[in-house]
Image: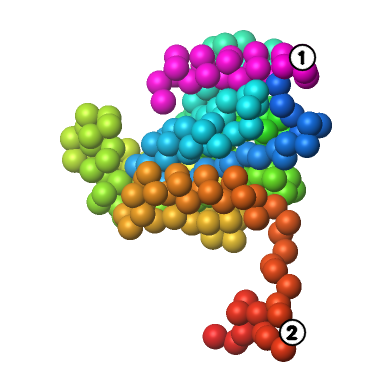
Amino acid sequence: MRTQAGLEQCLSFINCQLQPAGKRRSARDGVERRAVTISRQSGAGGHSVAERLAAYLDEHAPKASCPWTIFDRNLVEKVLEDHHLPKHLARFMPEDRISEMADTMDELFGLHPPSWTLVRNTADTILHLAQLGNVILIGRGANIITRRLDFVFHVRLVRSFDRRVANIQRSEGLSLKAARDFVRREDRGRKRYVKKYFLKDVNDPLLYHVVINTDLVPEWEAALMIGEAVVRQEFAAGKPEAPSAGKTPASNRAD
């Protein structure tokens, strides 16, 4: 998603939320809130899946509800707006792509607030957006930040290294070596971000409702799988179905 297009969608979402309650559907109208977080390996198709998912969810949304909106790069503008921060801070807020040494030096010389402050502000905005509903939040530990909200569906997208490199080559116009370096750097940065600020391993499958391998599941099909689960909202209860009398649940059997 291009930054300008993402910002326009962000503003459209905000304007919808600001409309009088009578002009839009909300949780108070008996419509369940829903939100999705997507964690992804670099080049695994996160944005493509998110865009297809948003289109699917809009098709199946109640009338007069706010459009499903993706927050990733445009999330930075929303954080700066929410916390009344100067726009030049945007360059200090990528998903930990700045080295820890550079970040520390910038803090010492007062070029930006401590990184913990920026991350806390980002977390506040992510939580607020999720509580509004109809949002797809990409990266930045959104699945951990919203883990106590039972209406949020958490997804992890993975893909083989070589295919991720090829994807980045096409999308970014890079050489093979540059694409490999890009993927490794992005993966390290995202893993470091989650570990440093949330004390979690981004690759831990227990942090997600589903982990989808986009080598084996096409991006359109991944979006359909996620969309169907969100529309049914079967995950929200967080409890398995009660077993029939005399039967042992599969999850309780010794494998």
The image's mark for residue 34 is none
Q: Where is residue 206 in the image (x, y as percent from the top left)?
A: 59, 61
Q: Where is residue 18 in the image (x, y as percent from the top left)?
A: 72, 15
User: Going 53% across and 56% down the picture, which residue do you hit?
Assistant: 210
Residue type at mark 2: give it. Ala
Identify the residue position indicated by label 2 in the image: 245
Report crowding for label 1: few under 14, some 14 to 19, many 20 or more residues within 10 A (C-alpha).
Answer: few
Q: Is residue 245 above or below residue 161?
A: below
> Which mark lies nearer to you, 1 or 2?
2
Q: What stretch is highlighted in magenta?
A: 1-23
Q: In this view, does 202 lie above or below 119?
A: below
Q: Which colour scheme is used?
A: rainbow
User: Going 62% across and 10% down the picture, which residue do you hit?
Assistant: 86
Lateral position of residue 255 relative to residue 212, left or right? right
Helix, strand or loop at disc 1? loop
The numbered mark, 1 or 2, whose residue comes first in the sequence reads 1
Residue type at mark 1: give it. Pro
Q: Position of residue 112 (x, y in %)?
A: 60, 19
Q: Position of residue 35 (x, y in %)?
A: 63, 39
**Viewer-closest of 213 and 174:** 213
- Prevailing secondary structure of the magenta residues: helix
Identify the residue position indicated by label 1 in the image: 20
User: Going 49% across and 42% down the picture, which residue do you hit?
Assistant: 190
Helix, strand or loop at disc 2? loop
